[in-house]
Image (cartoon, rainbow, N blue to C red):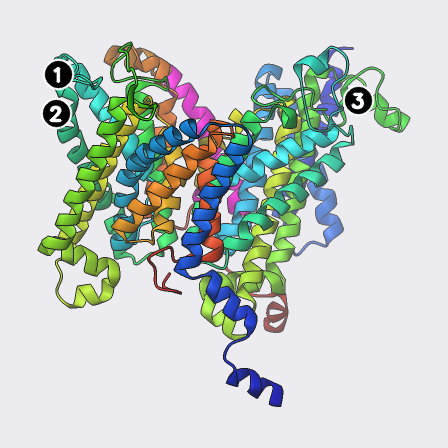
Amino acid sequence: MGMGDATLAKSLLLALPLWFVAARALPARLPWFARVALGAAAGWLVALAVTLVVPSGQMAYLVSFAIVGSIYAVLALGLNVQWGYTGLFNIGIAAFFAVGAFTSALVTTRMPTGAAAAFSQQAFGLGAPFLAGVLAAGVAAGVLALLVGGPTLRLREDYLAIATIGIAELVRLVFQNERWLANGPQPLRGIPQPLACLVRDPGCGWLPAPLAALFDPLTPRDYTYVYLAIATLVVIVVYVVLERAIRSPWGRVLRAVREDEAAAAMVGKDVARVRLQAFVVGAVIMGFGGALYAHYMIAIDYTHFDALYATFLVWVMLMLGGSGNNRGAILGAFALWGVWTGAAFVVDLARPLLAAISSDLPARGPYLRLLFIALLMLFILLYRPKGMIGEERFVSRDSQGRDG
Amino acid sequence: MAKALARRAHGPRLSARLRRALGSRTALVALLALLLLGLWLLAGAQGVTGQRLLSLAVRGVMLGGVLALGAVGLTLIFGVLRIPNFAHGDLMTWGAYLALFGLTLLPAGPPLAPFSFGIELLVLLVLAAPLVGLTGYLLDRLVFRRLRARRVPSVILAMAALGGAFLLRSVIYLGWGADFRNFYTGRPRPAVELFAGIRVRPDQLFIVGLALLLIFLLYLLLERTKMGKAMRATADNADLARITGIDTEGVIRWTWLIGGGLAGAGGIMYALDTQLRPEMGWWLMLPLFASVILGTIGNAYGALVGAMVVGLVWQMSTAFLNPAYGPGVAFLVLILVLLFRPEGIFGKPGGS
């Protein structure tokens, strides 16, 4: 079958996140079913137009860009619970990200057998489905957060930062040196791709025939479209749940603790407990992000979880978008990932110029991006502490109702 | 009611008393001694010879010296300026690379036997260390001062320091790439026998000697000069120091120059003993903070003690543990201190 036939399936997969965005962008006056229906139509039309207009090579690039952007968005949302809403300074995001990724990988892969067992070791391999892997990733990251947060969250705030740096270091060392655990320092390979049957022959057996026919033209090269739908779905679910939680009494307590710890304690809130809850919830979300990453990469090793990519970039993303704002976290993640990947092109273009300065420089050009991001972070801190959209001001739903 | 009154008459509850006893200085020192003893016994049980353990202990003191050079500056900046300086490790790296750069400019003399380095490295030590101090002060002028003026909480300062760390590292990557480097490529560094079959490299003895000398000079500065007294007073109580007319600007400048300078020297010494690579200082952050918190934030001598303990524990653990886990063992020390006595060995209970 030709490429043209796959267009419909691709556009439907792309339409999912657009549907959500469009439905939210429509005026709130409309009844909800109208927004859902109109959003679906608008989302699908945009997706179809994009699939038809953009050449498939560039489209593949855009799709993988959006997948990584979504993974970063999940991490930034997790950090937003900790820092944006509660004021907890976690600079060990890499730890929770890595634990989530490796946990999901171990839960979903099978123990290597035969000849492969000689090259690859892992502590266990359950061969469980993707969703079980994601949940296990969240649980593992949450337990780690409990262990780190327990002794440190009742102390002065900068101690948490130091402890999280420590745990990130320790987690990296463990996955680097413990062969039996997850094949360190070699990559742990063969992490299954969820719903890969959609792009394979024969398709997913459980799918109703019309849907199976719809996805039939997709080839394994189109798998990223399927994964983009999964990744954006995770972002949407995390976002919706967080938005509800933040507007709940629990969310108000978080901000009360951040703004004035003493006052929150005075009205009878158990400050240490609330902080620990927020720390764990944020870490669980970061664990989900790790699982998403593992199943996208198929093979992971400890080098993927260094402080630069897994911690520093996420921080700048949240600060750029606006701490204390979930939409800001998502926006910041995509914007900064765009800047980061776009800067690679700029550095490539500047290659001759760099070569003119020093013969060593072109090879080191990619580090210009790090320089730029570090400067950007300091610039935001000094001149735009609220980020692009700043914290959302809102009152609770009850008092809104009373006002209206 | 009667019960509550009786309890009050008998002082605090048993659990509270127990907690206080566990949080005492004696308990922490005993705990650390137990930890060292445990490491020793564990190693002994695995058939590690006493001689090897002793030479590990000597290496631990050497490592402690390097850590102390970083930790003393970190604790001063933390205590006096209230900045949890996450750029401190990268300031150490910066010092090492500045020295590496200097080596390409200066003519290389013959090695100062028995050491592996020539006179040019000593010259560079004197030149590069103050430059690192200046770098720190520059960072303060450009970033921290503006944030201080806005009276931001200390976590924001920590975040700015993190930005500074990555800024410095990106400059190092651009200048020298990500590869391992050596001050002197291919120069042999034989170990000599110290006593009782314990072998160390002469460079390592130099490192310990230099660390002790620099910290002694710092002691003189803190105890005997007006600026030193002003720094200690600010670390003790910043507000009180300010209203008693202490030259705050001078204190800030000197804290960065001294803290950064010591970090630069520490970085050069660390690179002399191992190798240069852009992440070397970042990976020292955890042991450095463990030393600082163990020795009580703001207490320079405490940082020295903390660094020695961390260095010893780190090296001793390698007798039976993968040496890569050294910084992880430092993390264990940190967690123990945070659990039992977060104010550190020399702190006042509930002080921080």
> Residue at (51%, 38%) from the top-left corner?
B41
**Relative to B231, residue A46 above or below:** above
**Relative to B322, residue A286 above or below:** below
Q: Nearer the viewer, mark 3 or mark 2?
A: 2
| Residue that mark 3 sits on | A197
Q: Amino acid at mark 2?
A: Val
Magenta stretch, main secondary structure, is: helix
Report the front residue among B67 and B50: B50
- Give the extent of the magenta segment: A319-348
Q: In this orientation, does residue A283 appear?
A: yes
Name, please, the residue furthest toward the left. Answer: B225
Disc 2 crowd rating (10 Å Cα; few below 14, some 14-19, many 20+) is some
Report the front residue among A199 and B125: B125
| Residue that mark 2 sits on | B123
| Residue that mark 1 sits on | B106
Q: Amino acid at mark 1?
A: Leu
Residue A161: where, in percent of width, then height? Answer: 44, 47
> Residue at (73%, 29%) from the top-left corner?
A124
